[in-house]
Every structure is written in structure tokens, then in C-alpha cells.
Image (cartoon, rainbow, N blue to C red):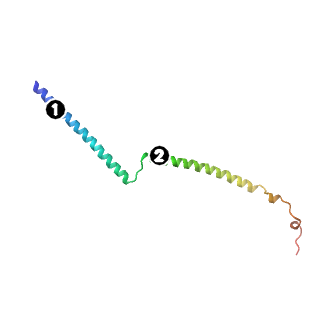
Amino acid sequence: MQTDNRLFDDLARVASGALSTLAGLREEIEMRIKERFERFAGEVHLVTREEFDAVKAMAAKAREEQEELAARLAALEQRVAALEKAPGPAARRPRRKAETGTQSG
């Protein structure tokens, strides 16, 4: 009966050692994959998430400013059009006698 216990103890030790080795191997593989991916990402000029978010925020702000400027431009264009339609002070000015008289000549 003791030989069975020894056999099970030895098998348990071997299995435990194998699991420890596999866990270490798994960590090593994950580290190597991460290193290769980071190297690849650097070669193809990928950006980090932080950089992407910063540029996205800048683009959103620029878009808002562009929309505000477009609205201001439209309002100014309406004002200019209204001023062009309204008679100006030069049109209301009375004509001089020389301008209304007959031309000599």
C-alpha cells in the first residue's frame, strides 16, 4: 500500500513541476509576443491610445470652432446683403443744379 502512495506522491510532484514549467513557459511566450507586437507597432508607426484620444479631442474642438465661424460668417453675409439692398446716404443726397440742368454744348 505504501508503494501506491509513493507512486502517487511522485506523480503529483512531476505534475506540479510540469505545471510550474508550463506556467513559466506561458509567461515567456506572452512576453515575447508582446515585445514583437510593440516592435511591429513601432515600425508601422501606430499611435498609442492616449495620442489617438488627444488628436480626437483636438479634431472635435476644431470642428466646433469651424461650425461657430461658419455661423458667424453666414450672419455677416446676411448683414452685408441687407446693407447692399438698403439705400445708402449717397442715394438720398439731393442733386445739385448743375447735375439736374441741361448740358451745354
The image quarter containing residue 99 is bottom right
Q: Nearer the viewer, residue 79 or 13?
A: 13
Query: Can you give x and y, in whole percent of width and height, for residue 42 in the image?
Result: 37, 52
Q: Residue at x 19, y 34 (%)?
A: 15
Q: Secondary structure at mark 2?
A: helix
Q: Amino acid at mark 2?
A: Asp
Q: Along the horizontal axis of the image, is 72 left or right of 30?
A: right
Q: Residue at x 23, y 36 (%)?
A: 20
Residue 19's place in the image compared with 42, above or below, is above
Mark 1 lies on residue: 11
Within-10-Å neighbours for mark 2: few <14, some 14–19, many 20+? few
Q: Along the horizontal axis of the image, is 58 left or right of 24?
A: right
The single residue placed furthest to the bottom in the displayed view is 105
Q: Nearer the viewer, mark 1 or mark 2?
A: 2
Q: How many marks?
A: 2
Query: Can you give x and y, in whole percent of width and height, for residue 44 in the image?
Result: 38, 54
Return the mark for residue 53.
2
The quarter in which the C terminus is drawn is bottom right
Q: Amino acid at mark 1?
A: Leu
The quarter in which the N terminus is drawn is top left
Query: Can you give x and y, in whole percent of width and height, for residue 12 in the image?
Result: 18, 31
